[in-house]
Image (cartoon, helix red, strand yellow):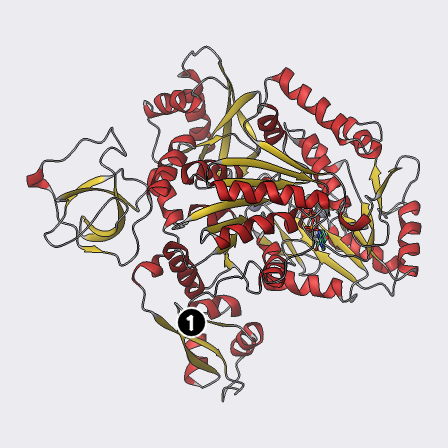
Amino acid sequence: MTRARVLLLNAALGPLDYRVPAGMDVQPGSIVIAPLGPRQIIGVVWDEDGFPDVEPVGDNRLRPLIGLVDAPPLPAPLRRLVEWTADYYLAPPAAVLRMALASLSALDGPRSVIEYRASGRLPDRLTPQRAQALDRIGERQGLVRELALAGGVSDAVIRGLVKQGALEAVEVSVDTPFPAPDPDHAPPILSAEQEAVARALVAAVDAAAFHPVLLDGVTGSGKTEVYFEAIAQALRQGRQTLVLLPEIALTQPFLDRFAARFGRAPVAWHSGLRQSERRRAWRAICTGEARVTVGARSALFLPYARLGLIIVDEAHETSFKQEDGVRYHARDVAVMRAKLESCPVVLASATPAIETRRQVELGHYAELRLPARFGGARMPAIEGIDLTEDKPDRGRWLAPRLVAAMAAVLERGEQALLFLNRRGYAPLTLCRTCGHRFQCPNCTAWMVEHRLTHRLACHHCGHVMPAPRACPACDSEDSLVACGPGVERIADEVKALFPDARTAIVASDTLWSPARAAEFVADVAAHRIDVIIGTQLVTKGYHFPDLTLVGVVDADLGLEGGDLRAAERTFQQIVQVGGRAGRGEKPGRVLIQTRMPRAPVIRALLSGDPERFYAAETENRRRAHAPPFGRFAAIIVSDEDGAAAAETARMIARTAPIVPGMEVFGPAPAPLAVLRGRHRHRLLVHATRALDVQAVIRAWLGGLDWKAGTRVAVDVDPYSFM
Ligand code: ADP
Ligand code: ZN
Ligand code: ZN
């Protein structure tokens, strides 16, 4: 090649043409360093016809490429995936490419780095900052920057500790190889039902062709055990597997379980990796040495050399939907990646999304079922508690029947789990004297009290303030009251009711790292915890044999927002959290507190007949032409200046093209009208499935101009309507 079209890591730019200097051996996919103005920038050589609309530049005006990165070229299926994702989600191709090149240090970093860790010596002068840093760093090891972040201090404090000998240098080779998992290390003896499903999955791996499968099995039926057999087969064939999990908190238990089955841990990929770990993982993935990678959704775009299998575990989880930057749905992109890589993709879930079930109905996806729990464990008994009749005491949230059930469980030395999808102590704080409510200065949202940290926090932008003693509006002291419960408040109630019970709160602010999550799992397994109080984080994946009671504190909570998927989500969450009960030999029981015992979702949950719920909910969607029968795309306009945002939103609405099969609603101020100081207005595009709605939106918005500070984001197949 003497000239090359290069997609640069700069979202504002399309691909640019360069001259390939003599002696530089590039091909499509090669990662290169290119000049851009006075700067040097990473890019990937793209196929000639990858972006047909780009005007070629004359040979005489081409600038030469600067260098070629020492890494395998991005494989063709990944290049097609970048194009498809950019096209489908209306995102800049460079923004998608950035997810593939997710470790820049892997491209040019040294092969070893110097990290630091505590030496056990104290510095001569132990300032409060140094003490704090050492305390928080603990056993951790990392780069100066990473330790500064962990310690909550500046880089200078860390360097000071190094100089004083309190932190010592460790040379870490960043590319130590990952040993391969052994497919025959400790295979389970499968039940006949599991065996049949495993055989079908193994056959799909053998066929090495695109094959999407819904693995639909009740909680505890052995879905993981069964897809492990498919992974074993991919290992035997020398092909790579990607396992996507919905939460990084689930990574550690998964790694342990995997290691028990295969003798080695898989390669982990998530946002909590240190830079050196990231680099090592990335390089191992693109050389093919990483045989099995497990990660959060960002692992989907990595440059696997020989992908042979993709698993999406808990595939119904909405956390697979990315809500900023490139707004993609990892479950859907995973299916597309499997198609481009010609390999099977397994969507595993006990509560598949209606969208996924529809694909099965249409015959696009195969379905494999595991209708019973493994080893004779029974599904838990589900009962409702009507809060309008069985009332909790004043200022309490747990009904007498739930409290009695907890008492019985604790008496027997078993464990209970209370589910409430609300972080913090109370969702709203107000002044009893003047009615003042604490609102976030940056968002249309109440500040949530976190009593453990003595702060009020906004869950949308992260703004925090110390919990005040006096009302800022009327100066009354001791006049502030907490309204409504969060998990911390329920934990207080449990402690008041059962002073001897050991409790653990599980929410994203208490379980923010894989290590913390692993500690929690170990604590529950070793019976150091009697009652778990958790948000949606606890609905997923965990397996605790002695957990026999699940209490749903407020089943109506998820129905409040009333968006398209509210009922489905509530149903899934409660089935999933209920699925944590009675997974061992002891039978489980689920108590659901509700004020609406006659709401269809609640009745479906109590009836134990999920098919009825799915049928009714699917019919509702069909009638409303909602997904999966029709399509939505949201257009979100935001600006620090409210009038400018409203003006642009109106202009977009005014210029909406008239297209059969498409309707445009709005604009309207978003329910979350202000977010991080930006005023937001939304339009909703509703289209038939047959319409190429992306092409329509691209042409429509592409012809418009708005002022520099205004942002217009498109959310294709939106999950959040906030
Ligand atoms: P799911 O993923 O469907 O919730 P799991 O794969 O986690 O189910 O299985 C539930 C529990 O049953 C796990 O502890 C698992 O190890 C155990 N289990 C499932 N199948 C088998 C088997 N064939 N042999 C031994 N244990 C099994
Ligand atoms: Zn007041
Ligand atoms: Zn905020």
Which kind of residue does numbered mark 1 sit on?
Answer: Val
Residue 436 seen in the current view: no
Task: Name the residue tied to disc 1.
Answer: 144
**Residue 692 drawn at (x, y percent):** 42, 20
Q: Residue at x 31, y 58 (%)?
A: 107
Instruction: Place residue 503 in its image quadrant.
Output: bottom right
* Figure label count: 1
**Residue 6 drawn at (x, y percent):** 23, 43
The answer to whether 155 is drawn above or below residue 163 in the figure is: above
**Residue 273 drawn at (x, y percent):** 48, 61
Q: Residue at x 67, y 35 (%)?
A: 569
Q: Residue furthest left?
A: 60
- Report the side of 427 relative to 3 (left or right): right
Other-residue count near label 1 (Cα within 10 Å), few / some / many at <14 / 14–19 / ≥20: many
Q: Residue at x 48, y 40 (%)?
A: 207
Given residues 325 and 77, the one toward you in this image is 77
